[in-house]
Structures are given as C-alpha cells and as structure tokens.
Image (tube, rainbow, N blue to C red):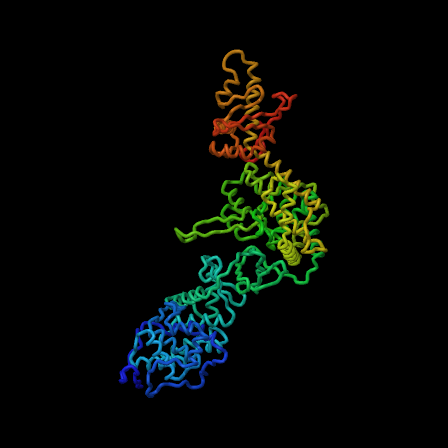
C-alpha cells in the first residue's frame, strides 16, 4: 500500500509499529468500557459484513476530524482521552505490560473508532494525522498504513465473548482451545486460558468479593476462597476448579493457570463489608442463613427479606460459621403462636426466680441487636450444682446453633469464638479459672473492642479481630467479683433447684422440641429485631435510657443501660398491638423490678468481692484482738506493740486509722494478705491509691467511714473509721468471710 504524505508530498516507505514486546491486545478492557457508553444511534460494525481494507489504495494524509468522529469525541470522554494520549493503565488485567507510547495510543484509538463504526481508511488516517500534528510528532506515511491495517485485522477476529456464549461448560470451552492449539501446533497459553475461563464464569453469574482482606469467588451460590490460609478451604477451591475447568495446580503450567485465575479474581473483586454469621450495619442487621443458596437475612426497620450473599445492593459479604446450622426464614409467620412456643419450650424451664424469667428470655431475643449497644452485658448464672444452669445453656445452643453443646474453652479458642459468633456460652466456669488473660477477653467482648495478634506465617503483619458476641457463663459463685470493671458489665442471676419445672418431661424432649421449632423461633427473633429497629429509628432507645438513668442514678450496671434499653424495645415488640410510633414515657413495673434486682445482686457481689474492704476488716479486728490480749501480758512485749511493729500502722481506741497515706495503707494490707495467704491483686501503691478512691463507696458499705484530707495541697491522707456496733465487743464481732485463692470461702 502506498500513502502520499500531505506534509512532504513524497511517497515514503512503511515503518514498523513500535516496540514489539508491548501488548496492544491488552487494551481490550479499556475499549470495551468505551463501547458501553457509545450513543445509541451509533451502531457497531457487523462482524459478518466485511470491513473496508486499505488494499493498494493511494491515500492523501491530511489532518482532519470528520463531524461524526467529533460527535463521538463529544459524547465519549474515554475516546476523547485516547485522542489526547491519556487513560491507559501501564499493565492489563493479566499483569502484562500495555503499550502506552504514542503509537500505542494511535492503535487503540483506531481500533475504538473502527468498532464505533468509523471504517473509512481515509477518515481514520485523517484522525491519526490530526492527533500527531497536535502532539508535534509527525509520522511517516507507512506508519498510518500499517496501524490502520493491523487494527482492522484485529477487529475482524472473533471475540472471546462469542466463544463463551457458544460453550455450555467452561470445561468444554477449554478443551476446544486445547484442541485448536494442538491442531495449529502452537503452545497453549495458560494465561489466555485463565482469562477466557474467568470471563466464562462471569458470564454465568460468578461474583468476586473482597471483605476484610478475604478474597471470595462465588459461583452457583457457593463461595470459595482462592488464597485462604485454611488448607481445607484451599482444597475445596482447587477441587471446584478441577471439576469445572479440568485444570489442577500441579506442575508449572497448572500453577500459571491457577495464579492467573486468582489474580483475575482479585482484580475484579468488589470491596464488601461483613462478618461471619451476624453483621450489624448502620440501620440493618444481616444474618447468614448458611443454606445452599448462599442467602442472607436482611433485617431493617421496614421489614425482613432474603438477599443473596456477595452480590447485593448493600455490598455485604459474609462467610459461613462452622458451628451454626442453616435455618429457613418463614415469611408468613404467626408471631403470637411462635412466641407462645418460646414461652413453653424455653422460658418455663428457666430456673432463675420467677419474676426474672422474662428478663432472661429478652436477653436471648435481643442478642441480634447488641451491635447497637456500646457495652454488651455479660450474663452470669450462679447457683449450686443441679439447679438447672446447664439446661439453660443447652436450650440456647439448640436455638442459636441448632445443636446442644455448652462448651469448655481454652483462652485461645475463646478469643476466636467471641470474634465469630453472636453468642458464646461457657458452662461450669468457676472463679478459680478466671485468669488475667481471660478477664481481658471478657472485657474486650463486653466493650465490643478488638484484639490484635500476629498473622500466621508472618513476622511483621498483624490481624485485627473484633469481638461481637454476648457472653453467657454459668458457675457456682459470682465471677471476678474483685474486678469492679467486670462486675459493672455483668448481669448476675441466681438459679435454684426449687424453681425447676416438675412436669416429668425429659431434658432430651425439651431440646428436641427447640430444634423442631428452631426455624419459626429464629424467624420470630428476626421479626422482633425488625420491630425494635423501627422503634430505634424513632428515638425509643434514647427515651428508655433516659428513664433508666432517672430511676437508677447509681445502678451498679449503669454502663449497660444501652443493652437494657434494647431488651426493653424487644419486650415492647412482643405486644400484639405493637406500633412503631409508640412513645416511651414510662417503664413497665415488672421491668423496673427486674433492673432493681440486678442492682441488688450486683452490689452484693461487688461488696463481697472487695479485697480492700475485707483486708481492712481483718486489720481492725487483729488490732482489736491484740489490744484485748494486752490485758493478759504484764511483762515483755505486748501484742499491740508487735501489731504496730509488723504492720507499721496504729489504730486508736476510737477504732480509727488517722492521717494514713495510700502507700502506708497499701504496705499494711499487702503484709496482711501475704501473712494469711489471701488474694490481693494490686501490685503497686499508686494503683492501690486510685482503686481505693474509686471503691470508696463499696468500702464504706462494708462498715467504714472514710474522711479524705490533703496535706500541703498535694499529699492525700485518710481517716478510716471502723463502725463496729456499739453493743458488740471485739470478741463477739463476726469473723470476716474472705474468698481464698481457689474461690471458696475461708473463715478467719
């Protein structure tokens, strides 16, 4: 072909098209994006009809942009950017380098114009000439000829989409490509096979998501994790790929195919948010149904509906929870009838006080809403053995998990469970097992905090796990009563064997009934959650909290008022005459009585577990006994002198420690605890000083009066009075009941 240059008027020889190691076919993605937004009146050229070629025509190169090309530029910003030499990425989606030189932009521009219907070589050459004049980079005549011819030749090739549309299975398409490569005696391009396989899956409804750095490839309702650290999940993905494509990751070629496919999944992944089984958004709650259709339950103030996992309008992607069985949401639910079943198969068998059973029920029913509470209250069931605590734990696991397994945990497994499940139940957890590490995990879960740990297989990377569970534990005695931060976050309920249901029904029958009605019960929980969200959106939770603060200004669980307010909304949602517009002007009498009982139980546990108050009581009594013993000593060192020498404190006859500093008192109590092998979990005088001030109310409730004084405006001193009954002698004073290190009560 010969082209006459308008600039020189001379016939010039052809030129090569630039660097040969750069991919121009990789511009397909950009070109397809351009074609998606072409004007409706611009038709693509038919692939079946012939596209005009240059042949040996003589074309005069003159910079010119025709009106229809100018219209395309005006309507298509991406096409305009190609003309201006902008908009191309340095690599394509397969990781191959894209030609971003000026000749590369020329080729992409011509190919885009051809697919937009501009097939006249003279018109195309004019656009290229105008672009090169604009860029001040004149080209030889042969350059235009080869660029246009190559673009036209490529435009006539059948597209991958056609191959995808004619193949019933991905395996069939790949086998055809292998056969074609063998027939043509060329080596099979594994990256190309991975690309067409990925496009086939996309055309058949596959989706890719990235949630919390977890890559998921979902096809036919099943999610796979291509780069999971879990060997079982990787094995499931490889088995799926071998079944669908006939490829495996063994060998170099298989490795190239799998790596290329995984890279494509990552490139096209849509960023989503979500969790494992339960996820709380700004105004919605999402529950993973765990079914074969890969569906989620979307609970909002407007109602409950089923949506598809990974591909939904909320951009939510949730992974499955291993221990939770699937359940079916029942659309046409008789809520009143199901609530009666909950009363019959759950509430009636609770062994706490009769007036507290509905409180325990509402705690479970509101467990899906705890994401809206800053503090998630810990539930602690206490009572002697054989009082029905374990039955409650089994009922809850049957309802939430679909199987009965109140578990015992290690610290490591417990930290994993509180990050994956909406509720964690720990049966037979006693006070002696409450280590400092376990206490921190309880507090993290109660505050909805996160824990950071090193990522497996690395030395420098970390992963963050956010706790989302409500914790329910059961044991004989209150848990961690010496830790005020734990007691203030714990609802303590006492169970008794006298409250057991005496109907002769076996425990197995009760649990099987819960499993049988699990679908309807969880569906009822979803409806109640939706109603509570409707009231929440109207400000009902705020009103309930204000009333709680008004009635209980000094409640031991004041930091859990948000959780209590959510429970109250769920209780209101049970009303057959429920209305989202209801205004909460007063709390019900039964709810107020229950919150009062919580405060009473919490204060008892708080006072009983206050180590400082117990040691102070013992210190004053030892001093009283020493002074009583002075009467029997005529010569030698008197017991009161030995007491003063040993503990470096002096208690006057008015039973008062006067002008004592926090450091001096800490030294005396530490010595006393060490002598009697008693627990004292404060390691420094500074910590003791702060805790002594914060626990002043509990210490005074144990029988003391504390007067705080300041010396020189800096040092804080205290006068501590021990208020013995006037008519009670020291010898008749009750012996303090102090918990021993193993949790039992020890009389001294």
Q: Residue furthest top?
A: 634
Q: Which is more toward the observer, 394 or 495? A: 495
The residue depicted at 51 percent of the width and 65 percent of the height is 218
Answer above or below: position of 427 versus 616: below
Q: Residue furthest bottom?
A: 57
Q: Which is more toward the observer, 642 or 576? A: 576
Residue 136 x, y percent position in the rendering = 31, 74
For the N terminus, the quadrant is: bottom left
Residue 355 x, y percent position in the rendering = 70, 44
Give the quadrant of residue 745. Answer: top right
Answer above or below: position of 106 versus 634: below
Q: Which is more toward the observer, 400 or 24? A: 24
Whether residue 267 is visible: yes
The residue depicted at 58 percent of the width and 61 percent of the height is 296
Whether residue 172 is visible: no
The residue depicted at 56 percent of the width and 56 percent of the height is 282
Q: Is residue 635 left or right of residue 70?
A: right
Q: Which is more toward the observer, 360 or 98? A: 98
Number of on-image labels: 0
Answer above or below: position of 258 versus 348: below
Residue 486 x, y percent position in the rendering = 56, 41
For the C terminus, the quadrant is: top right
Q: Is residue 458 left or right of residue 544?
A: left
């Amino acid at each position: 072909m010969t082209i006459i240059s308008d600039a020189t008027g001379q016939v010039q020889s052809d030129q090569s098209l630039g660097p040969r190691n750069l991919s121009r076919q990789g511009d397909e993605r950009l070109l397809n994006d351009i074609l998606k937004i072409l004007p409706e009146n611009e038709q693509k050229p038919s692939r079946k009809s012939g596209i005009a070629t240059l042949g040996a025509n003589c074309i005069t190169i003159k910079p010119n942009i025709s009106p229809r090309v100018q219209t395309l530029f005006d309507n298509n910003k991406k096409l305009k950017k190609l003309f201006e030499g902008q908009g191309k990425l340095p690599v394509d989606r397969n990781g191959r380098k894209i030609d971003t030189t000026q000749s590369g932009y020329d080729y992409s521009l011509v190919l885009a114009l051809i697919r937009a219907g501009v097939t006249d070589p003279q018109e195309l050459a004019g656009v290229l000439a105008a672009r090169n004049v604009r860029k001040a980079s004149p080209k030889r005549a042969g350059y235009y000829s080869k660029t246009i011819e190559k673009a036209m030749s490529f435009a006539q090739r059948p597209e991958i989409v056609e191959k995808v549309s004619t193949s019933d299975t991905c395996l069939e398409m790949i086998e055809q490509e292998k056969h074609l490569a063998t027939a043509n005696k060329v080596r099979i391009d594994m990256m190309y096979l991975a690309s067409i396989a990925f496009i086939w899956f996309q055309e058949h409804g596959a989706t890719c998501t990235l949630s919390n750095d977890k890559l998921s490839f979902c096809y036919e309702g099943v999610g796979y994790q291509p780069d999971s650290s879990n060997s079982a999940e990787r094995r499931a993905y490889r088995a799926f790929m071998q079944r669908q494509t006939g490829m495996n990751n063994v060998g170099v070629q298989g490795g190239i195919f799998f790596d290329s496919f995984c890279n494509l999944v990552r490139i096209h992944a849509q960023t989503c948010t979500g969790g494992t089984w339960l996820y709380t958004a700004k105004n919605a709650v999402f529950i993973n149904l765990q079914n074969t259709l890969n569906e989620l339950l979307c609970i909002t103030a407007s109602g409950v509906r089923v949506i598809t996992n990974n591909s939904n309008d909320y951009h939510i992607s949730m992974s499955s929870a291993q221990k939770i069985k699937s359940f079916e949401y029942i659309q046409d639910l008789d809520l009143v009838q199901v609530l009666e079943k909950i009363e019959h198969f759950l509430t009636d068998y609770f062994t706490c006080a009769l007036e507290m059973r509905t409180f325990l029920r509402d705690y479970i029913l509101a467990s899906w809403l705890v994401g809206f509470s800053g503090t998630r209250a810990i539930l602690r069931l206490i009572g002697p053995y054989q009082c029905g605590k374990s039955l409650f734990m089994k009922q809850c696991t049957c309802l939430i998990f679909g199987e009965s397994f109140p578990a015992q945990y290690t610290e490591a497994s417990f930290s994993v469970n509180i990050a994956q499940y909406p509720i964690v139940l720990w049966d037979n957890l006693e006070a002696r097992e409450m280590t400092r590490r376990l206490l921190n995990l309880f507090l993290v879960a109660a505050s909805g905090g996160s824990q950071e740990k090193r990522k497996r297989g690395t030395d420098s990377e970390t992963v963050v796990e956010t706790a989302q569970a409500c914790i329910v534990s059961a044991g004989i005695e209150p848990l961690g009563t010496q830790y005020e931060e734990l007691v203030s976050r714990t609802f303590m309920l006492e169970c008794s064997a006298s409250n057991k249901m005496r109907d002769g029904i076996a425990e197995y029958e009760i649990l099987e009934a819960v499993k049988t009605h699990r679908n309807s019960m969880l569906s009822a929980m979803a409806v109640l959650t939706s109603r509570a969200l409707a009231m929440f959106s109207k400000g009902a939770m705020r009103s309930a909290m204000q009333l709680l603060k008004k009635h209980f200004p000094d409640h031991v669980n004041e930091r859990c008022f948000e959780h209590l307010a959510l429970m109250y909304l769920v209780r209101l949602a049970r009303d057959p005459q429920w209305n989202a517009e209801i205004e909460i002007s007063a709390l019900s009498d039964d709810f107020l009585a229950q919150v009062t009982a919580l405060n009473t139980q919490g204060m008892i546990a708080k006072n009983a577990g206050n180590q400082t108050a117990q040691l102070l009581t013992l210190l004053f009594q030892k001093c009283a006994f020493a002074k009583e013993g002075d009467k029997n000593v005529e010569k030698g060192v008197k017991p009161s002198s030995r007491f003063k020498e040993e503990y470096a404190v002096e208690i006057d006859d008015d039973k008062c420690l006067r002008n004592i500093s926090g450091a001096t008192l800490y030294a005396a109590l530490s010595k006393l605890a060490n002598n009697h092998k008693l627990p004292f979990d404060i390691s420094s005088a500074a910590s003791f000083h702060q805790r002594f001030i914060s626990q002043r109310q509990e210490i005074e409730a144990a029988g003391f009066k504390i007067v705080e004084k300041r010396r020189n405006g800096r040092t804080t001193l205290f006068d501590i009075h021990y208020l013995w009954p006037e008519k009670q002698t020291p010898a008749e004073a009750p012996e303090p009941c102090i918990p021993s290190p193993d949790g039992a009560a020890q009389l001294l």
